[in-house]
Image (cartoon, rainbow, N blue to C red):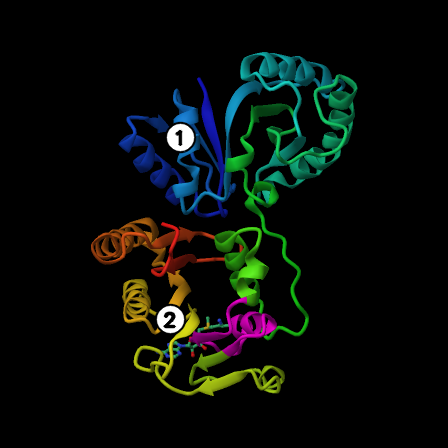
Amino acid sequence: MSALLMYCRPGFEKECLAEISAAAAERGCFGWSNLEMHSGFVLFETEQADTAYSLLPSLVFCRDAWPVRQRLQSLNPKDRLSPILSAVEALVAESGVKCFGGVSCEYAEGDAYHATSKFAGKFVNPLRQALRNSGLLTKKENPSLPALRLFFKESSSVLMGVDKPALRSRWPMGVARLKFPPSAPSRSTLKLEEAFIYFLGNDWRQQLENHHTAVDLGAAPGGWTWQLVNHKMYVHAVDNGPMDAKLMETALVDHVQEDGFVWKPKKRVDWLVCDMVEKPARVARLMYEWLHERHADAAIFNLKLPMKKRLHEWQEIKEQLETRIAAEHPDAIFRARHLYHDREEITVYLNLRNQNG
Ligand SMILES: C[S@@+](CC[C@H](N)C(=O)[O-])C[C@H]1O[C@@H](n2cnc3c(N)ncnc32)[C@H](O)[C@@H]1O
């Protein structure tokens, strides 16, 4: 039996499973899982793991995933390496991959798995060396080749598989470790930085260089505005709350003390961002209207999802936006993701002006 190993934010295992189950079922692919809540992973057992894996770019709640090909249990603590290397050889024969570009030893999250995470962190070095000695791993890491992935739930059992570079998360296990800029007024600044990197791709900085104006709805104290100012944009920061004094000294911020659901800019801006704590369907409608009426070219916004109906609420919003997009802006870019820095919320990217389809 094969499976798809999926990573998500601890506490979102149910959403992750329900989302893959629904998407896979549409392709005639069915599976199940014994969920471990707050573990940060879901093992989706299915005969069609490759089909399930190919759905990864469309999933919101899964941070990273790979198909499981081998499972080893009751590893001998005195020699875990030998059976793992034999399994790698079987994997190589089966997958047709001659040489891996990287190897990782991964683990579940949460206190219960702390010891295993330490073990996995140490085990990767001897494993890497052994794989290099056998010519199964490139001398230098090569991210353009498939990587060998191992997952230890405990140090005595391991799941193994091979990923595809095009489907691999740019951060190990989807955990975006970004450095907090000391002058930013709030930690949520990292949410917008992660969103830019994730949605715009490798050349995100160059893309932002061509953008000069932005509106930030629900801006106070200014973490998101800080990101925009950091890219030299002039920002209308809409919020009745106080903005960070240092940020205001940049002279790149116009603090608008108005209701974000009512206020509109006099001239069209390049970016609309929104972090208002409000009903998600109301925020999504507002974002669409802004772009549809050409007040802004593109938007990144947060949807705060209600605890008990996170997936359901998102699916309803998605359906409504998709219906309007199909009728009015069929070439739009519309993507969403539960980012590493998101908590009870997801982040959406909407661009109705997309020229490339
Ligand atoms: C999560 S905080 C924003 C944090 C901000 N993105 C940052 O990085 O510092 C939400 C903000 O939305 C503002 N807000 C909520 N409803 C609003 C409305 N109708 N109009 C304008 N601001 C609103 C609140 O005053 C609050 O400051």
Q: Nearer the viewer, mark 1 or mark 2?
A: 2
For disc 2, the marked residue is: 296
**Can residue 242 be seen here?**
no
Q: Amino acid at mark 1?
A: Ala
Numbered badge on residue 60 = none
In the structure shown, which secondary structural element does the residue marked by tag 1 occupy?
helix
Q: Quadrant of the N terminus?
A: top left
In the structure shown, which secondary structural element does the residue marked by tag 2 occupy?
strand
Q: Nearer the viewer, residue 99 or 186?
A: 99
x 34%, y 60%: residue: 352
Task: Report x, y in % for residue 357.
Answer: 36, 49
x 30%, y 65%: residue: 288
Where are the magenta residues, as a range?
A: 210-234
Query: Quadrant location of residue 217?
Result: bottom left
Sequence-wise first label, 1 or 2:
1
The answer to whether 97 appears left or right of 57 in the picture is right
Q: Is residue 8 above or below residue 149?
A: below
Task: Report x, y in % for residue 334.
Answer: 36, 53
Instruction: Check if residue 78 falls in the magenta segment.
Output: no
Instruction: Check if residue 220 falls in the magenta segment.
Output: yes
Query: Quadrant location of residue 141?
Result: top right
Residue density around tag 2, few if under 14, some if 14–19, many if 20 or more, within 10 Å? many
For disc 1, the marked residue is: 52
Q: Amino acid at mark 2?
A: Ala
Task: Report x, y in % for residue 84.
Answer: 67, 18
**How much space separates mark 1 and mark 2, taking CA atoms?**
36 Å
Quadrant position of ligand 1: bottom left
